[in-house]
Image (spheres, helix red, strand yellow):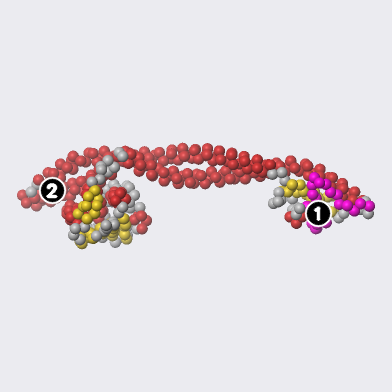
Amino acid sequence: MSASNATATNISRSEKRTLFRFLGLYTFLVVLILGLGSTIYYNLQKDLMLQTKRLELEEFSKELIDGLKLLHIYFDRYRTYPRNPLYRSAIYDADKVLIFSTLKDPKGVRLDKVIYTTPKHQIQYIHVLDSYYLGAKYVVVEIDEDRAWFYTAWRNILLGGGALLALFLVAGILLARLLVAPMKEAMSLLDRFIKDTTHELNTPVGAILSNIELIRPERLDSSTAKKIRRIEIAARTISNIYKDLTYLTLHHQIASDNQDVDMSALVHERIEYFRILAESKRITFQTDIAPRITLHIDASKAARLIDNLLSNAVKYNRRNGTIRVMLKEGELRVADTGIGMDETAAKEAFKRYKRFDTAVGGFGIGLNIVAMIAKEYGLRVEIVSQKGKGTEVIVQWRVS
């Protein structure tokens, strides 16, 4: 995989997180709007069906009222409640007490309504009488509901709603991509800047360090020796940044040469490399390094991991502080007495370009590189930190 592909992958992950958050909220709002629209449409279709049936039920109620009127006049002769196989009916008095009913469920009648559907899928129409026949004030006419409208309405809701949802989601994805485009462009520019900077740093840093190594400090006066020492500190700092940037942009192109690395010797070597940087802040090292500790890893990546832990311990430490380095079977610990960080910052410490103190230099990539190497080799990395008291980074691995 090329460096550009690695960058694209990193951008893609950030882009996906932003897209998922935006689309989650966007989808919720779209579903809410479609749900509201579907409810309105459903109720309109139901009202349309009831208005259509109302004309039919009004005719049935007139027929029933005529029958009640006839029964009221000739009650001694007929005494038979009017019935029709096309509908069912009931009559209630002024106190809404049932007088007589052929309804399926006379208890559920809602005399305050005009026309409505029951839970058992009947349509009931209420007519209030002007004249009392047989003591009746309310006439109820009931027919079975034709459910064709219901299935048609739901089919239209599902088809139309599904099509609109798909259309809105496509529009949402396009809108989200437009929103993340500036972020994508900014990250691309930053990675391109890092890549170009890395290329430009190589030659001058190498030349500075090579020439410093040729200088014999004992032949210099104290003033010149201090200046050379400052140059060496600056050069080593730049060199460490250069190595980080190189790893960040090229690590996917370089094949790992895994072998059993003597971590004890490597940790000692990297401490000596950073000792001159630590001494510039009067920071002392305290070491507890067990001998002959080995780890199956690429030596250059192991050095990158250790360097970044030591670099951060120097960078974020206080003057006259201490760095404790402990190495034993299956574990490396690097602790400082520096500024520390709170729990939230500790959780975000491995994010690329994340910096917690703008007064301290760097690109915010050191711990991200540590996390990348740890993930590649199955190492467990933990940060224990307390604001104002220091930070300890613990790297653990399985011992075979």
Residue 266 locus on image (x, y percent): 19, 53
Q: Within the magenta stretch, is there residue 213?
A: no
In the image, the segment drawn in magenta is 77-103
Residue 101 disc label: 1
**Label 2 secondary element:** helix
Please tell me which residue is depicted at 31% across the width and 59% down the height of the picture. Answer: 384
Task: Work out whether residue 151 or residue 393 is closer to the camera in this orientation and state it.
Answer: 151
Residue reaching furthest to the right? 77
Q: Earlier in the sequence, mark 2 or mark 1?
A: 1
Q: Is residue 153 left or right of residue 172?
A: right
* Amino acid residing under circle 1: Ser
Label 1: how many residues lie within 10 Å, few (<14), some (14-19) or many (20+)? some
Placement of 197 over or under 385, stated as above or below: above
Residue 324 sits in which quadrant?
Answer: bottom left
Which residue is at a point 75% across and 42% down the rendered structure image? 53
- Residue at 31% over, 55% down: 380
Give how far across and how far down residue 368 sits, in percent.
31, 49
Mark whose residue sits in front, 2 or 1:
1
| Main SS class of the magenta portion in the image | loop
Per the model, the C-alpha gap separating discs 2 and 1 is 111 Å
| Residue 287, image x, y percentages | 20, 61
Instruction: Work out which quarter of the rendered image holds the C terminus and state it.
Output: bottom left
Residue beneath the point at 12% across and 46% down: 212
Residue at the disc numbered 2:
228
Amino acid bearing label 2: Ile
Q: Is residue 78 magenta?
A: yes
Q: Residue 13's mark?
A: none
Work out whether residue 234 can be spotted. Answer: no
